[in-house]
Amino acid sequence: MVEVLNTVDPVDVDAVNAKHNRSLYAKRVKIFPKRVSGTFRQLKWWIMAITLGIYYVTPWLRWDRGDHAPDQAVLVDLASQRFYFFFIEIWPQEFFFLAGLLIMAGIGLFLVTSTVGRAWCGYACPQTVWVDLFLVVERWIEGDRNARMKLDNGAWTFDKLRKRLAKHTIWILIAIATGGAWIFYFADAPTLLPNLFTLEAPVVAYSTVAILTATTYIFGGFMREQVCTYMCPWPRIQAAMLDESSLVVTYNDWRGEDRAREGQRRRNPENSYGDCIDCNLCVAVCPQGIDIRDGQQLECITCALCIDACNSVMDKVGRPRGLISYNTLENYENSTKEVPAHTHLSALFRPRTLIYTAVWGLAGLAMLFVLLSRDRLNINVLHDRNPQFVQLSDGAIRNGYTIKILNMEPQPRSFRLAIEGIEGATMTRTGDTASAARITDIDVDPDAQKSVRIFVTAYPDYLDGTSTLFRFTVKEIGGEEHAEYEALFHAPEE
Amino acid sequence: MATKEVDEHSGTETTGHAWDGIKELNTPLPRWWLWTFYATIVWAVGYCIAYPAWPLISSVTPGLLGYSSRANVATQLEEAAAAQQIYIEQIGALPLEDIRTNDDLLSFALAGGASAFAVNCSQCHGSGAAGASGYPNLNDDDWLWGGTLDDIYLTIAHGVRFDDDSDSRYSEMPAFGRDGILNREEISDISEHVLALATQEHDASAAERGAELYVENCAVCHSDNGSGDTALGAPALNDAIWLYSRDRASIRAQIQVPNHGVMPAWAHRLEDVTIKQLTVYVHSLGGGE
């Protein structure tokens, strides 16, 4: 009998870098948010109705601007470079208004975030609103969470095919309406709509509709939370915007833990458990597929649906609401089961939010001031450089100017251009037969710029060396508006 | 063998790399991201096939769609030329005065004239048409050969003292000194009189002597009061604008052996429509009569 001397005991180990252990890519796991009702769900329905309403209806609003301007209340006229917003008309050089609006939007977002966290993400972001809309359709056709999961896992039956077909058809219709509405902001909506159907609209209209339809359908129907988690920069910026006093959707674990289900509680009556009965409803309703009880997470858009879900459960089990609630990090950390900290309104008024509010308000007031005091008449003067001056046979000196008069009103207007300064100086206008004078009248088309060539002639005796300051003034005939431009008159050295 | 390290907070495996205690999580990329990447590759391949892409020795692969930015530009230029045709025809058919008083034709002619001027005329007259010594300034109101539209047109079309064009404007001032018509004293006296006509500093007694000589020798072209004669290309001597210079030495030199400027006739080189546009342009510079 021979004994085996060299036996080897297998080691219980799993290779860390084994292929099956380490996937470089993660597959999206489908999320089937359960229907929930409550305060925040109600609020979200309202916000959804309002934002979608604004989006779809705005291009159809009319605003009378007379015969010389479009009557669409909100219109971005790219071809003629005008932006119309109700009583406001903006020219390209007034583009700073858009910069101002973006600054206000940015600071507004900071303000909102520093006070109520990612409210934008949870309530008003188009991604959230359209995903909500797509989910409504999905629930309507396929049923709530369990039915949808069952359908999704089930074999391809006629019923499944029918439901899927109906769902995707409605989704695509919504997507087309969404992409379609966008282009109405850039052209006269009542004209463009029939043109779209008779194939008379410009190619760019169709391609824009096609692209936006595709993105709406894909983002709203399939990518959903992936857009927020992987594509959107805001969740990353978020980390820098929140502080200890910002309201965020919080699972108050000081009150909820230790969590236990009913059975466990019955079996161990001597243990003191927290309020969380581990029903997982907060997880089931979450459109982002997270468990809020894990704490603050990048994926959380603070839609507050878990609050609604948990409140309904707390009502049922006879515990106070607010196990999941809007809470600040500061309160959360200072709270214990015995002494919960309460959120005070004063948390809203801290230096940071006050500064944001002040800057936001100042930007708004500055824009309002500029808007109310801006000119609808402008004059620009380009002095000839080559030659700077021309000597005339009688010894007079002549300078040439190209004068641009901007009539920014949607009506035709006439203006009186005049020279102020330089005694005896007169002007003539190319293409005008009038004799030399100190004034000339110029008609400008509505909402247009007129360019005129002006020759100013002056005698050396009245000139102040090689360059003399004078003014072109322009005044509306039969109106109040006026503008002026300081110009130089060049003369040769004596 | 490396040990698998898991981040305590996120529960995600780390790459093992740490910077100042911050560890890099080894989060897997979403798979759709990978597919998007593949889609861009497929798109790029398709694009290479559909559009001009790969450089060859003397050209590029043409692409199935036959797209060419150069051909697009050529088409746009043709379209632009076709759109201009209506103006060009009108300018060709209408008299100059009608072009000048029609807003659309005027702005078209000014643009065309300006570019023709830059190419053909600016070499002598300057890019701003301000001229130089011996080359007239076209901005002012003093014209050697007349400043009406028709005068300007004739000058551009047939030139000045241009031998190859029989209709060229022609005149020649005698070389009074070189040919012995006048002696040095007489030339000096006439120069003083010309300075007087130009209201410049002068020797009054010499100018008085020169006045008589001026009437005998010069007035037939330059006229008694020195206002010149555009029919003969005789410059006005009584104004502030001088083709050469109005100092004493220059005037004497001009009487002794005159300079004569030459301008080519453009009718042989430019189309009539272009000359008309140039005429309107030069006329618009400020001195047009």
Image (tube, rainbow, N blue to C red):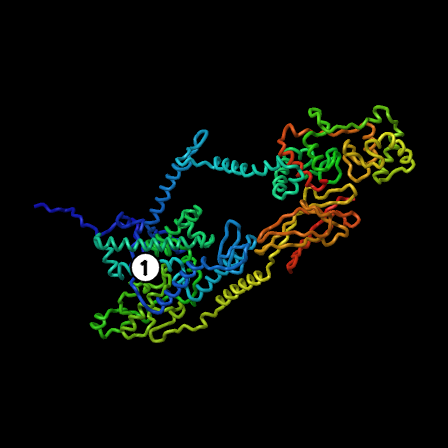
**Quadrant of residue A297 in the image?**
bottom left
| Foreground of the two, A122 or B172 | B172
- In the image: residue B29, left or right of residue A352: left
**Quadrant of residue A389 in the image?**
top right
The amino acid on which the numbered mark 1 sits, given as a three-letter code, is: Leu
Could you say whether the residue bearing mark 1 is in a helix, strand or loop? helix
| Foreground of the two, B39 or B76 | B76
Would you place residue A186 above or below residue B160 in this image? below
Residue at the image position 50 percent from the left and 52 percent from the top: A77
- Crowding at label 1, few (<14), some or many (≥20) Cα neighbours within 10 Å? many
**Would you say residue A370 is visible in this rendering?**
yes
Q: Where is residue A343 in the image (x, y as percent from the top left)?
A: 41, 72
Q: How many labels does the image show?
A: 1
Q: Position of residue A341 (x, y in %)?
A: 38, 73
- In the image: residue B46, left or right of residue B131: left
Residue at the image position 53 percent from the left and 55 percent from the top: A69
**Quadrant of residue A226 in the image?**
bottom left
| Foreground of the two, A326 or A91 | A91
Mark 1 sits on what residue? Answer: A135
**Would you say residue A103 is visible in this rendering?**
no
Q: Identify the subunit bearing mark 1.
A: A
Would you place residue A114 above or below residue B71 in this image? below
Q: Where is residue A315 in the image (x, y as percent from the top left)?
A: 29, 73
- In the image: residue A202, left or right of residue A318: right
- In the image: residue B270, left or right of residue A90: right
Q: Position of residue B212 (x, y in %)?
A: 90, 32
Query: What is the quadrant of the C terminus of chain A in the image?
Result: top right
Residue at the image position 59 percent from the left and 38 percent from the top: B87
Would you place residue A28 above or below residue B143 in this image? below
